[in-house]
Image (tube, coloured by chain):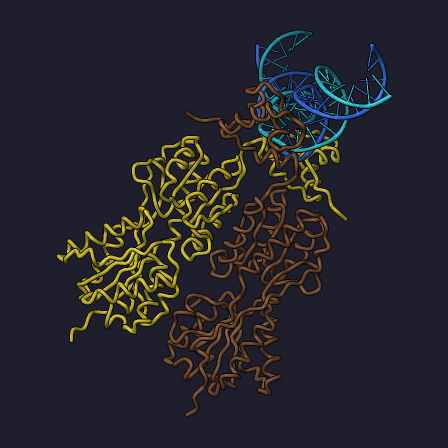
Chain colours: A yellow, B brown, C cyan, D blue
Amino acid sequence: MIKKKISIKDIAKLTDTSITTVSFVLNGKGRISKEISKKILDVAQKNGYEPNRMAVGLRTGVSKVIGLIVENIGGPFFGEMAKVIEEEAEKDGYRIIYCSTNNNLQKGKDMIRMLSQQLVDGYIITPMKGLEKDIQSLVDSEKPVVLIDGYFPGFDIPHVLVNNYESAYNAVSCFVRSGYKNIGMVTADLGLVQLNDRSAGFKAALKDHGLKDNSKMVLKVPYDMSKADGVNAIKEFIGKQKQMDGIFFTTNYLGTMGLQAIRDLGLSIPGDLAVISFDDNEIFNLYPPGITTIQQPTYEIAKSAIDILMEQISSRKMDASKIDLQIPSKLIERGSTLTKVTA
Amino acid sequence: MIKKKISIKDIAKLTDTSITTVSFVLNGKGRISKEISKKILDVAQKNGYEPNRMAVGLRTGVSKVIGLIVENIGGPFFGEMAKVIEEEAEKDGYRIIYCSTNNNLQKGKDMIRMLSQQLVDGYIITPMKGLEKDIQSLVDSEKPVVLIDGYFPGFDIPHVLVNNYESAYNAVSCFVRSGYKNIGMVTADLGLVQLNDRSAGFKAALKDHGLKDNSKMVLKVPYDMSKADGVNAIKEFIGKQKQMDGIFFTTNYLGTMGLQAIRDLGLSIPGDLAVISFDDNEIFNLYPPGITTIQQPTYEIAKSAIDILMEQISSRKMDASKIDLQIPSKLIERGSTLTKVTA
DNA sequence: ACTATTTGGTAAAACGTTTTATTTAATTAG
DNA sequence: CTAATTAAATAAAACGTTTTACCAAATAGT
């Protein structure tokens, strides 16, 4: 029994009414008498009528789908984000189409192009270097867009992200508070503004705390480097920095690579090296003695992004364009930054 | 400059041809002369023409979108899966709409209904108890469906998952091989067949190795229990099992809760307790002394699922209905199951 | 009692494609 | 030199909605 989908036309036939009438009743639009309404609703209900989204989309230009373009849907940060976004969007009857760019520019461009085929009503995008014009052209053509986790300096595109600068600054303060003064940093070589902001916050804090800004104590791990190579690079880096007593990892995956490096080197945390990493994570909670982290407010970021997007979608006002929402992070202090004991 | 999307009709006008001609050229269908073809292609290219997916979908009944319904897109296992699925689907020009059920039956039902509004060409679903009829009705209406990570006993719905029974069996064998004979298990109370299979494999292995099947050495943690409560439950469980020297966690999240419990109890791994967990994970690699895990072949599962789905989509043959693909897992042996040293 | 107005309902156009059936022009066959 | 074939292009219908414009009947206004 291959049940053919029932259409509005079928319902009209079954109820001896017109297509228009059915449509009006179903959408509560026109003025149709109680009795006819009831009859139509009944029949629709009984036959499990569901509107054909394609037809609706074609006619109205609204797909009720939003496009989510992130770096890696499989990662802990974006995965969590994706979940919240889905849940929030669903409340407004929206569904999510996603795609991971893996920080590949071409993939990002392709995706924006694909999705712009009248398929989605709006975009949530994690920006990457080189995508500026593509996204701007989206905005120019009045497509609602919200950036998360980053932004484009000089472009008026609404974005919401953690306050990277202050967060990194706070990390350094935490080190200092606990007595660590020779602090190194491991970051990635993507041109991402969020990483730059973290670096800037880090440096500013060093300066403000009167620590020497030894730029040799910064390692940039190439993004496309394999995990094993990355760990080795970090090991080598740590090996070279003889006087370093604290290390700051600017991302989640660098943090775990770092832990592995530290473990392989047989160093103790925080005895030999205090540690703070960006992006809280189950690992950092569990790994002895507990790693101090900067916890991103994923829920709030995602919620805000959806809210802003929906605002744009409903009222076509673009006064949201100047939105620059930076949400504070939470420093989760754990064993890796216990007060330094000097021998 | 609000660029209006250009349509096939516009191109026809610009090139002094008909709509049909343009459509034929763009799809390589009819017989159109080289010169006109070139002209049309040029104009289309120059104006950045992209077909309106809604219109195409309405006319052809094909959306080029597949629906992915998982338990939690944010989790490590499903996230990784989602990523592979997206990448593989993209090769065939498909995009993914996702949704997390959080093991909530109603949400699952709702999602299936929503997506069936002619919105998706096929489904990849992680089954949950109670969804049998909904999914079967999908199959009945000739919608391509593939289940991943589980299946419905007694229903002929194609599915691909890890060989749960054998995997759990192997875990026990690993314990035994290393000298651990009093093996407990922690599992969840969802009615999921994959968990049942794991339990069954576990018990069968105990029996085959001549170990006593002490059913008191099994803890079922309620799925909706908070993390803290879960950890406490596990702590209590471990506390009660005085002679237990090895413990098997049937899922990822139970494994990490278990690690926390063990850490809180101040027990050493594997000295006091050997550990194996299902689902490999960065944590298990990093956490000292390294936790032995059953690594699911996520890539292969996802790839196979997509392949089977595409097969169904392209050739409307339903002979795939009896597909029961169980892919072997890989036991990653780490420090948590080092050979037992008896004092 | 005639004109306004409201009420309940519908026909038909439009959204942008794909595809079938047709037309016209050009080529080949006999 | 016609008749048959083929090549090139197109008109028009259809997919399932939403929505504008319109109509007829009933009600209200004066």
Q: Is residue B191 visible?
A: no
- Spot occupied by residue A267 in the image (x, y as percentages of width and height): 27, 72
Figure label count? 0
- Residue beneath the point at 56% across and 60% down: B300
- Spot occupied by residue B325 in the image (x, y as percentages of width and height): 64, 63
Please, which residue is most extreme toward the left here? A210
Please, which residue is most extreme toward the bottom here? B343
Is the residue B157 above or below the residue B196 in the image? above
Which quarter of the figure has residue A128? top left
- Spot occupied by residue B96 in the image (x, y as percentages of width and height): 54, 48
Front residue (pair B36, B177): B36
Q: Is residue B265 left or right of residue A338?
A: right
Front residue (pair C12, D21): C12
Which quadrant holds the C terminus of chain B? bottom left
- Spot occupied by residue B277 in the image (x, y as percentages of width and height): 49, 72
- Residue beneath the point at 52% across and 25% down: B43
Front residue (pair A248, B231): A248
Is the residue A47 above or below the residue A328 in the image? above
Q: Is residue A90 visible?
A: yes
Which quadrant holds the N terminus of chain B? top left
Q: Is residue A88 left or right of residue A36?
A: left
- Residue beneath the point at 27% across and 52% down: A198
- Residue beneath the point at 26% across and 50% down: A165
Front residue (pair B262, C25): C25
Is the residue A332 above or below the residue B178 in the image? above
